[in-house]
Image (cartoon, grey):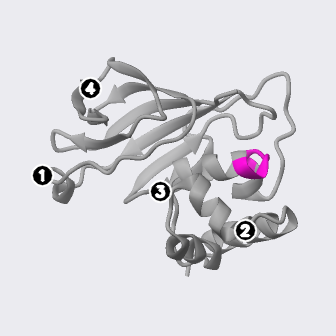
Amino acid sequence: MNTKLIEIARRIKSLREILEISEEEVCTKTDISLEDYRAIEAGTKDFSATFIIKLAEIFNVDTTDLLTGKSPTLSTFALSRKGEGLSMIRRKGFEYKNLAYNFKNKNAEPFYVTAPYLTEEQNKPIALSTHEGQEFDYIISGSLKVQINDRIEILTAGDNIFYDSSNGHGMIAVAGKPCEFLAIVIKKY
């Protein structure tokens, strides 16, 4: 049993109840089923980075509040050294490291992402998600197949893509190895 996941689930449920927001309202605003949401609150189902970003907006808190139970405190600058950041392992092994988790009132969420190469995903449709705002992805190493609505692009080291993230988007590592990239999710105001 994943104790970190259960701790996050408890924080999510507690905040939702304190704010008197129904499960159904959360489901509508995060685009997930009631069954999946209840499993997340029970700590038996993992969630995506997109879900936690949307949930933080609904609850009017920082993603760090949900993930750690502590509010960010820095306001002048936040520094992350190589290999540092608040880790989140999501979506079949995708590892996200929030590089500014301890900076409060952020206008963007910067993530260092490692996408695993998974053979079983190579010939399947890419799962798409949406969230408010915009996103910038910069490829550091490996290759990433990115889909925005019906358009598919293959990005390699040094390539980048910027898009309106309210459009369906998804990505998988290709070319037989993991892909590392910088993802900056910019909030909509």
Q: Left of 130 or right of it: where is 145?
A: left
Q: Which residue is mark 1?
A: 123
Q: In this rendering, which labeled residue sits more in front, label 2 or label 4?
A: 2
Q: Left of 120 or right of it: where is 163?
A: right
Q: Of the residues shown, which amino acid type is indicated by label 1? A: Asn
**Residue span colored magenta:** 58-64
Q: Which residue is mark 2?
A: 22
Of 108 and 1, which appears nearest the observer? 108
Whether residue 63 is visible to the viewer of this picture, yes or no, is no
Q: Position of residue 67 (x, y in %)?
A: 69, 56
Q: Left of 99 or right of it: where is 61?
A: right
Q: Earlier in the sequence, mark 2 or mark 3?
A: 2
The residue shown at (77%, 63%) is: 21
Task: Indicate the quadrant containing the N terminus: top left, top right, bottom left or bottom right.
Answer: bottom right
Cα separation between marks 1 and 3 = 21 Å
Q: Of the residues shown, which amino acid type is indicated by label 4? A: Leu
Q: In this rendering, which labeled residue sits more in front, label 1 or label 4?
A: 1
Cα separation between marks 2 and 4 = 40 Å
Q: In this rendering, which labeled residue sits more in front, label 2 or label 3?
A: 2
What label does residue 155 carry, if any? Answer: 4
Whether residue 12 is visible to the viewer of this picture, yes or no, is yes
The residue shown at (77%, 65%) is: 16
Helix, strand or loop status at disc 2: loop
Count of all numbered marks drawn on residues in the image:
4
Of 167 and 143, which appears nearest the observer? 167
Proximity of marks 2 and 3: CB atoms separated by less than 8 Å = no
Question: Residue 11, located in which quarter of the rendered image?
Answer: bottom right
Q: Earlier in the sequence, mark 1 or mark 2?
A: 2
Q: Earlier in the sequence, mark 3 or mark 4?
A: 3
